[in-house]
Image (tube, helix red, strand yellow):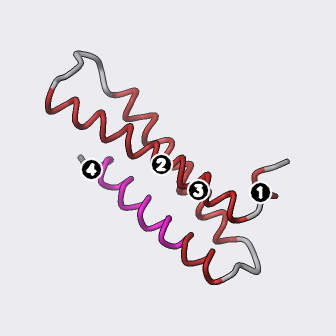
Amino acid sequence: MKWTEQPPKILLQRSFLFGITGIVLCFLGLLNSYFRVLEAPMGPLNGVGLALQLVGLSLAVLVMRKPKLTPEIKERAQKMIVILAVGLLFFILI
């Protein structure tokens, strides 16, 4: 089954999981760059984190584009878009 054919609730759950995983990975890279717990390059970790946030953001936008959404689902998707966009901008600009 294609991702575009999934129900909106499942897409929002996946969006949340991808987004929170990406935020945690970027945050771990940021913490390691300040505290030097591991002497390893954090570029690939940050890249994967940013990619996961972009996937989560795109899934939330995909939900918003679906017709006939309930107001609850629409509100959740809007919140998810705002949170992931702010997180993505934060980790890009730092």
**Residue that badge 3 annotates:** 58
The type of residue carrying mark 3 is Ser
Tell me the magenta residue range: 78-92
Write the residue at 29% across / 33% down.
29
Residue 53, which numbered label?
2
Write the residue at 61% across / 79% down.
72
Magenta highlight: main SS:
helix
Q: Secondary structure at mark 4?
A: helix
Q: Are marks 1 and 4 in contact (CB under 8 Å)?
A: no
Query: Could you say which quadrant of the image residue 50 lies in?
Result: top left
Residue 60 lies, in percent from the top left, at 59, 62
| Dot placed on the residue nearer the N-terminal end, 1 or 4 | 1
Q: Residues within 10 Å of mark 3 (few under 14, many from 20)?
A: some
Work out how far the residue at label 4 is from the one at label 3, CA to CA, in angstroms.
20 Å
Work out how far the residue at label 1 is from the one at label 4, CA to CA, in angstroms.
31 Å
Q: Residue furthest bottom?
A: 71
Residue 4, which numbered label?
1
Query: Could you say which quadrant of the image residue 87 lies in?
Result: bottom left
**Residue that badge 4 annotates:** 93
Magenta includes 25?
no
Residue 26, which numbered label?
none
